[in-house]
Amino acid sequence: MVVVEIPIGPQHPALHEPIMLKVRAEGEEVVEVSVNTGYNHRGVEKLLEKNSWVRGMYIADRVCGICNAVHMQTYVQGVEKLMDIEPPPRANYIRTLVMELERIHSHMLVVAVMAEVIGFDTLFMMIMRDRERVMYLKELVTGNRVHADIHMLGGVKRDIDEAKRDKILKELGVIEERIKHYKKVFETDYTIVKRLSEAGIIKRSEALRLSIVGPTLRASGIKSDVRSDDPYAAYPEVPFNVISRDEGDSWARMMVRLEEALESVNMVRYIVEKIPQGPAIPKAIPRAAKPGEVISRVEAPRGELLYHIISIGGANPYRVKIRTPSFLNILNTEKVYIGHRLADVPVIFVSYDPCISCTERVVVIDEKNGKKTYMSMRDLAKVRVE
Amino acid sequence: MEINVGRFVFKEVSPRRYVASVALSELREAVGAVVMEDSYFSALTAVDLPKDGKIELDYVFWSIKHRVALIIKVTVDRNNAVVPTVIDIVPGALGGELEAYDLMGVTFEGNNRLRRGFLAPEDMVEKGIYPLRKDSGV
Amino acid sequence: MRLAIFGEVLANLFRKPVTLKYPVAREVRVAPGFRGKHYADLMKCIGCSLCAVDCPANAIAMDKLPQPLKHNQRGIFPVVDYGKCVYCYQCVFVCPVKAYIVTEVFEMADYTTGTSRDLSLSTVKGGGSV
């Protein structure tokens, strides 16, 4: 039979962000897939070298829209180690609260996107409606639905009070009930089970060599979670279970995410009830770091996020390397598609929870203000606004 | 504290981070030994050190058996940055090597999937600039 | 064959739609503490320019005061360009005298919302247009 090359992307209704999957198919069966990236490249790593530590927090926050609090947490955690500061316990609890809220809404998003990709539009709309409750809670705690911006070097920027705590507890009850309902839908609905099972099986023996991370790894039977292996923020004190499954197919990946969302609901409840008293907002912002290097790792909703920060002293970092989970999950799993039908390709791709803005954020490209932005006080006074 | 992996000694630099510096010729052996410790490849960082005339490569692995991060450091000359590839031992290192080639200009011999334009946009590729180098002018 | 969400679909037939017909209906529920339009109160600002130094979007420029103010030796005040601002509120946080006034206004997608210059100048007695 003839081998036909079919490009899926960069613009395609099945994908949510620009990426090209060059699929070579023989009839209906996929023979080879190669992943082409480069459509969303923004030059974040070089930008971080040119801006100060404080500005870098906001640049790191805007690498990804869905997982922004974890990016900021990884950056701030690493820089705090370089500056030898320890945030107060209450600040750690508030940071963990925002990160877990983000995990819930991110998992609901990918479950909704999977429902949409297989054609189940009603379920997509319903999950998005319930996800709005989580976004409202994020807005209550941080001030914005999407970008949390709550971290600060040495603590957090805002605190929560009694009224907010009661509101969070009340909404959590509704959210938990809805997620349990969606979990039941994914377990029992005939179409979903038939379409998702046996699609894109990654066996336990090859999962480690392929370097997949996050729920994709845990759905292949390996219990590896940064929150329990390499704890940070308030995770040493908040109890939770590491969820894993043995099947290794797309259905298992979705089920792991739904069960993790339920675990996160319990964690948020624990945090809100047991948060310690004390200060959370730092008084002074440190500006310079000592020379050294630090590797900070955090469990983003999609997997393990790693920042390698190198400093030679001074107000700017020397080198910041960001390795996002989607970078590993998408690029290393090209062989998994082989042997499946063409209609399974979007299903498998979405089950990795792809976040293309996270995949391509390396280096330079800021032609507009490539010059240094440091000006003395006198120069600042001279700048006029038109 | 130290961890012995094969014949390499990893020293602790901070909680759960162990580092070993190896020579370029021992790189593949070190990577093979680390993979035996039930670990997965996590990241490949390329650092440009123009003052020493070198580029430093840090291979970060996470070992599930020991629950620590094992970091292998190699340095290579900046003007002749050629490193043996490890994607036959660890297929997961493909993205890291592609990125280091496209943005820092480190060639991995044995990797036939290297290409410019993986991440860098077209005008960088046309001018032949490696954007992450300190003297690239971007 | 089990259609698991059948019961919910049936119930939704009799419920009010959740769609909010914005901008015809404008009761948008924004949580208290939302980060909206902000501007500097010139009766408190001392002109230290920390907000302009820290802004990650380079959205704050310092402009000359139209009249001398005793507590502002440098004679400059910050002007926020709402087009460039990302509403991270680093400026609000870093200000040593907490001179920023914050609001929950978010409807700024028009041609008239330029910068915070007029809003800031309106906080000075006798200020306004220069």
Image (spheres, rainbow, N blue to C red):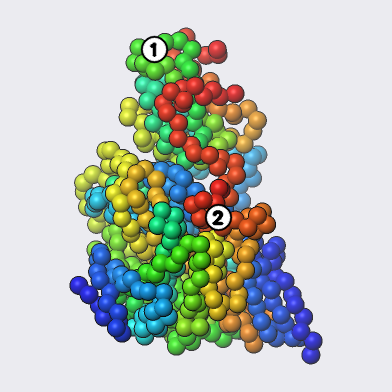
Q: Which mark, residue B131?
A: 2
Q: Where is residue A124 in the image (x, y as percent from the top left)?
A: 59, 65
Amino acid at circle 2:
Pro
**Secondary element type, mark 2:** loop
| Residue at mark 1: chain | C
Q: In which quarter of the image is residue B119?
A: bottom right
Q: Identify the residue at horizontal 34%, vertical 44% (top origin).
A: A314
Picture layout, residue A189 above or below residue B138: below
Q: Identify the residue at horizontal 27%, vertical 38% (top origin).
A: A283
Q: Which of C64 and A274 is in front in this view?
A: C64
Q: Identify the residue at horizontal 50%, vertical 77% (top origin).
A: B85
Amino acid at circle 1:
Leu
> Which dot, 1 or 2, sits closer to the camera?
2
Picture layout, residue A188 above or below residue B46: below
Q: How crowded is mark 2: few (under 14 residues within 10 Å), some or many (20 or more)?
A: many
The answer to whether residue A59 is seen in the rendering is no
Q: Where is residue A93 in the image (x, y as percent from the top left)?
A: 29, 55
Q: Give the position of the C terminus of chain A as an image quadrant.
A: top right
Picture layout, residue B91 above or below residue A283: below
Q: In which quarter of the image is residue B105?
A: bottom right
Do the CB atoms of the residues marked 1 and 2 lie less than 8 Å apart?
A: no
Q: Identify the residue at horizontal 59%, vertical 71% (top origin).
A: B114
Q: Residues within 10 Å of mark 1 (few under 14, many from 20)?
A: some
Q: Which mark, residue A12?
A: none
Residue where numbered disc 1 is placed: C69
**Secondary element type, mark 1:** loop
Q: Where is residue A17 in the image (x, y as percent from the top left)?
A: 62, 61
